[in-house]
Image: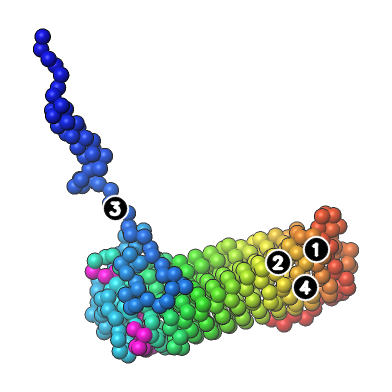
Amino acid sequence: MMNLAIPCKIRIILLLVFCSGCVGGLFPVGEKDAAAPPPAPVVRIAPSSPPPPASVISPSAAVNPEKKQRVYVADAVSDFTYHNTTLTRDVTWNGTVSVRGVLTVAPQATLNIGPGTVVTFRPDDTGAVDGALLVQGRLCARGTAEQPVLFRPGTRTVEPGDWQGILLLGSKKKNLLEQCRIEGAVTGLEAIYSTVSLKSSHVAACRTGLRLKGSLLIASGGGASGCELGYALVDSESDIREAAFTGNTMGLSLSGGALQLVFSGFSSNTVRALEAKGARLSVLRSTFTGNGSGLALDSSEGGITESTVSANQELGVRLTRSRMRLSGNVISRNTGVGILVDDGEAAIWGNSISSNGRYDLYNAGREELRAPGNWWGTPSPPAARKRIYDREQDPLRGAVLIEPCLVTAPEVSQ
């Protein structure tokens, strides 16, 4: 009888051949329809780290994570062209400037930009590093109303995230952007442990218009529009005056630090005009109209004075664990609630609070809230109380003390 047993060596050979076929089927090599490897992750510099060298923005840090198709206009003749370059001496730009990859301004150098200059950014020749301007020295960009300085991607159309943006890193040399416009960046202007002044400068169509970390900002005019987040201020000192935040998803977010906000306007921000957590803020003569919600303040302190919070789709003002003074404001025609509080930390007086959705004031906490000397749209305290939610509606809520009420609407300065 024939022996059908397969010798051991032959069995091993057959097993290897079979496994190699399986491996080839699961992980095809060299096929045209093979899936492309995932893009390199975006690496951000930890804010607590010391300022790194000029090569801080590496290919992995500035890669286009979405690999979206961008249509770039043909390169025109530029007055200045850079490709992953470091400026070690003072330079002045006028005319047109083309930046491929990352342009770095070294700590000892100053970049001056004159009126009407247009700076475009695109990836480097490898396509791996998106355009960016990294400033460790000083940036001084001065445009005029007739000839602003423009920072934008080299694409045919502008969309958020088409280039990385401008990063001020450890630069406390009085950086200035006057009559400038920044468009289509991941973060239009980011300042980490830096000092910057903005005069009539605007960010538009960016994922985040302006982001600060441990920095000092003085801004007048300008603002943000069409961004996912207009301004993000983290552990920074900011003075913002006569700025406009329109058509963003979120207008301004404040975390820690301090903000002085004067004569500024927030409108058509779809989620919220302003939010703050663990911060000190003073809001004076500003307007919050036609947003998703007006102001949401958590664990913050300061004041809102002589401002208008009106016609927002949800809440006018929400206060959570916040020692805020509300005085001389108009809070009206908000679709939801005029003022929502979670405790008794706030003090509310001298305001005109009326014609809001279901309630003009809603006490969601257990503590008493003092709100004397306000106008509630009626000279009658019993009529005013019908639009105030407190212990009278729910024994578990704290009382709202409104007496004495104003018998006429106060003259509110705007």
The answer to whether the residues at label 1 and label 4 have Cβ atoms under 8 Å apart is no
Secondary element at tag 2 = loop
Q: Is residue 39 above or below residue 29?
A: below
Disc 3 marks which residue?
37
**Quadrant showing the C terminus:** bottom right
Q: Position of residue 52 (x, y in %)?
A: 37, 76
Q: Which mark is residue 367?
A: 1
**Left or right placement of residue 34 versus residue 138 in this view:** left
Secondary element at tag 4 = strand
The answer to whether the residues at label 3 and label 2 have Cβ atoms under 8 Å apart is no
- Whether residue 145 appears in this view of the structure is no
Q: Upstream in the sequence, badge 4 or badge 2?
A: 2
Q: Upstream in the sequence, badge 2 or badge 1?
A: 2
209 or 259, which is in the foreground? 259
Q: Amino acid at mark 4?
A: Ala
| Crowding at mark 2 (Cα within 10 Å: few <14, some 14-19, many 20+) | some
Q: Is residue 140 above or below residue 223?
A: below
Q: Which tag is nearer the camera, tag 4 or tag 2? A: 2
Q: Amino acid at mark 1?
A: Glu
The residue drawn where x is 26% and y is 84% is 79
Disc 2 marks which residue?
321
- Whether residue 5 appears in this view of the structure is yes
Q: Upstream in the sequence, badge 1 or badge 3?
A: 3
Q: Position of residue 385 (x, y in %)?
A: 85, 63
Q: Position of residue 176 (x, y in %)?
A: 45, 86
The residue drawn where x is 69% and y is 65% is 320
Disc 4 marks which residue?
347
Residue at the outermost front position: 8
| Residue range corresponding to the magenta coloring | 106-125
Circle count: 4
The answer to whether the residues at label 2 and label 1 have Cβ atoms under 8 Å apart is no
